[in-house]
Amino acid sequence: MIQPLFDFDLKRVSLEHYITGKAAINFPRPETTTGGWHFLSYFDREAGVVKVSLAGIHYPDTTAFFSDLGIIDVTEQMAKPGWSVEGRQLHMADHYRAAADMIVRWALSESANCNLEVDEWFPSPSEKQQLLKVLDVAKPELFQVGRLQKVEAWLSLQ
C-alpha cells in the first residue's frame, strides 16, 4: 500500500512525528523572514483543511541526522487560529529543520533534482548560513549512508 503524502488532521502530530516539509516551511514565524508564504495551502481553518507531512511517516525519520535540533512546540501558535488536539502538544520543524528534512529526504532518494529553493526561502546571507549550519550537523550521517557527495554537489550550485 502506498503511504499518503499528507495527514488531514493533527491527531498523529507528536515530538517524534512532528510537522515538517512544506507545511512547516510555510508556517509563519514572526521572528524570521525565512520560509514560504502559502500558509492557507496547508492550514485553512475556515475550510477546516490541514495538509501536513509528518516526520517518520511521510518523511524519513531524520533523528539520526539532526537529533531534535529545530523541533519546536507550536501548540499555542496553532491554537490561536483554532488548530488544536485536545490535551496534546503539537510539534513542528522550524524553517531550517524543515528545509534540512527536505534535503535529506531528497538525498536519500534516487531523484536528481531537489525541490528546495534556497534563495527564495532563505533570502539573507545569515539565513542561508543558518541552514548550512543545520546541514553541517548531518554531514557525518550523510557520509555514513553514502549521500554526502550528492548534497555537497547540490549545495555548490546554490
Image (cartoon, grey):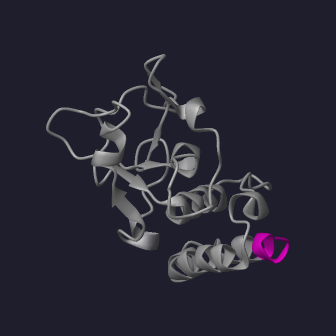
Among the 4 quarters of the image, the one containing residue 152: bottom right
Spot occupied by residue 65 in the image (x, y as percentages of width and height) = 46, 71
Q: Provide the residue span drawn in magenta.
A: 153-158
Q: Inspect this view and state whether residue 144 appears.
A: no
| Residue shown at the point (37%, 50%) measured from the top left | 18
Residue 42 in magenta? no
| Residue shown at the point (54%, 76%) measured from the top left | 134
Foreground pick, 46 / 14: 46
Spot occupied by residue 106 in the image (x, y as percentages of width and height) = 65, 56
User: Farthest top residue?
Assistant: 47
Foreground pick, 16 / 81: 81
Foreground pick, 23 / 5: 23
| Residue shown at the point (40%, 71%) measured from the top left | 69
Among the 4 quarters of the image, the one containing residue 103: bottom right
Spot occupied by residue 67 in the image (x, y as percentages of width and height) = 37, 71
State the quadrant of the C terminus.
bottom right
Q: Inspect this view and state whether residue 99 appears.
A: yes
Spot occupied by residue 72 in the image (x, y as percentages of width and height) = 35, 60
Among the 4 quarters of the image, the one containing residue 54: top left
The prevailing secondary structure element of the residues shown in magenta is helix
Up the image or down, 116 lies above or below 153; here it is: above
| Residue shown at the point (85%, 72%) measured from the top left | 157
